[in-house]
Amino acid sequence: MLEHLLFRNFGSKAALFREALVTPFVDVVESFQASWPTIRGNANEEDVASDLHGTLYDLFVGNRGLVMTLLAADALSEEELAEIGIHDIRRAVAVLGRLGSEGVDIKGLRSGDYDLAAQATVAMIAGMAAFGATLFDGKPPTRDEIVEELTQMTLHGFLHR
């Protein structure tokens, strides 16, 4: 019954996927991009990264099933990818790469492939959200501990803390 109601409102699983995960993801990135002129150079990069990572983590945790679909998207056809909005996700991640590049330039640092860094960051956040307690033996870390680790890994890597 619930499935019938959902599909009556959204028309397809792809439309539901787009509405529940793709649109909110793109909205988060667009909001971050809109705030970038006031953030860049003025804010603490750890606070900025933590806020963004926390927002994305919460979005992905709230939609774990859809994130698992996204993680398996390689099995979808190009038509299915377009229908679920994967191109919108790719464009949004490219925006994050560009903003990351600007942020690194502001700091006077140089790095490699900013697009790949943004893709790796989003994948790491999505993975932590999707796998949840599966990765943890015993007591899992709190949401804040996970977001802090994601932030530290993204900004400082494993060996450069």
Image: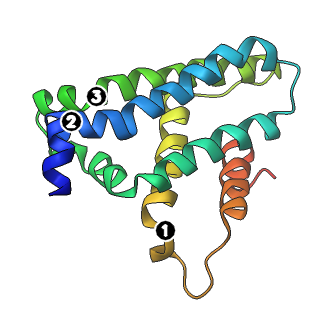
- For image coordinates 21% across by 45% down, the residue present is 6
Pointer 2: residues within 10 angstroms few (<14), some, or many (20+)?
Answer: few
Query: At which x and y percent is residue 82?
Result: 20, 25
| Horizontal side of residue 129 vs 144, given as left or right | left
Residue in view at x 55 percent, y 35 percent: 117
Does residue 108 lie above or below 148 as drawn?
above
Q: Position of residue 106 (x, y in %)?
A: 80, 17
| Among numbered discs 1 and 2, the one appearing first in the sequence | 2
Q: Residue 56 at what x, y percent from top left?
A: 56, 43
Residue sticking out furthest to the bottom: 138
Disc 3 marks which amino acid? Gly
Distance from disc 3 to disc 1, alpha carbons, whole Å, reads: 24 Å
Dot 3, crowdedness within 10 Å: few (<14), some or many (≥20)?
Answer: some
Q: Secondary structure at mark 1?
A: helix
- Residue drawn 65% across the image and 14% down it: 34
Q: Marks 3 and 2: which is nearer the front? A: 2
Disc 2 marks which residue? 9
Q: Amino acid at mark 1?
A: Gly
The way the protein has been coloured in the rendering is: rainbow
Q: In whole angstroms, how far apart are the C-alphas of marks 3 and 2?
A: 18 Å
- For label 2, the SS is helix
Q: Are marks 3 and 1 in contact (CB under 8 Å)?
A: no
Closer to the chain start, of discs 3 and 1, is 3
Label 1 and label 2: CA atoms lie apart by 30 Å
Quarter of the image that includes the N terminus: bottom left
* Residue 70 visible within the image: yes
Residue placed under numbered mark 3 in the picture: 85
Horizontal side of 36 relative to 91 (left or right) equals right
Q: Which residue does the numbered mark 1 point to in the structure image?
A: 132
